[in-house]
Image: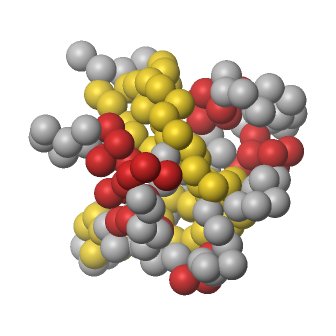
Amino acid sequence: MKTLSCGVLIFNPLGQLLLAHATGQRHWDVPKGGPDEGESPRAAALREVREETGIVLAADALEDLGCMAYRPRKDLHLFRTLLDTREFDIADCRCTSFFTHPVTGLPTPEVDRFRWVDMPEIPALAARSMTVVLRQLPGFEAMPEAAPGR
C-alpha cells in the first residue's frame, strides 16, 4: 500500500522556488507531508506549509498539479502558488512541527533553514526523487542533471 505526501511549490516573483532544509539531512525539500485522517490533499498541503514554514496560504491560491509517483511506496500530490514577497520575508519562516531527536531526546524542528533557489540549483540541493518528479512538470523540463553521486 502506498502512502501519500502533499506539498506546495512556492515561487517568488523572480521564479525562484522555496526550499526548506530537512533537519539532520543532506537534502532540501519543498514543504510537504502526509495528510491526517480524512484530510484532503489541498488541506494537508496548506497545513504542512503552515507547520514547516509559518506561511499561511489561501486554499484558492493553489494550482493543483495532481498526484504523481514519487517513491516506490509513496505518491506525491503537488500544488503550485506564487508568493508576493513584498508582503513576506523568508527570514520570517519558522517551523512549528517537531520530532524527538534520536540522540538528544529533545524536540527538534523538522526544518531548520529556508532559501529561494533558481531552477539550475535544484538538482544539487533536492533529493533525486524530488528532482525526478519536478522534471515531469511544465517549466521544469530544462532543469539540469544532478552532479554525479546525487
Front residue (pair 109, 36): 36
Image quarter for residue 135? top right
Image quarter for residue 116? bottom right
Q: Please determine whether, in this image, residue 62 is positioned above or below residue 150.
A: below
The extreme front residue here reads 60
The extreme left residue here reads 37
Q: Name the spot of residue 19 as percent of width and height, x first.
A: 62, 57
Q: For this view, does 57 lie left or right of residue 82? A: left
Q: What residue is rendered at 53% in x and 31% in y?
A: 65
Q: Name the spot of residue 82 as percent of width and height, x first.
A: 63, 55
Q: Please determine whether, in this image, residue 27 is positioned above or below residue 140.
A: below
Which quadrant of the rendered structure holds the N terminus? top left
Q: How is the image coloured?
A: secondary structure
Residue 103 shows in the view: no
Q: Please determine whether, in this image, residue 24 is positioned above or below residue 96.
A: above
Which quadrant of the rendered structure holds the C terminus? top right
Image quarter for residue 105? bottom left
Residue 86 shows in the view: yes
Front residue (pair 135, 148): 135
Q: For this view, does 107 lie left or right of residue 149? A: left
Q: What residue is rendered at 65% in x and 68% in y?
A: 84
Q: Name the spot of residue 113 as percent of width and height, x first.
A: 58, 71
Q: Name the spot of residue 138 as percent of width and height, x first.
A: 72, 27
Front residue (pair 127, 104): 127
Q: What residue is rendered at 48% in x and 34% in y?
A: 64
Q: What residue is rendered at 48% in x and 21% in y?
A: 68
Q: For this view, does 55 lie left or right of residue 117? A: left
How many marks the image carries: the answer is 0
Front residue (pair 56, 61): 61
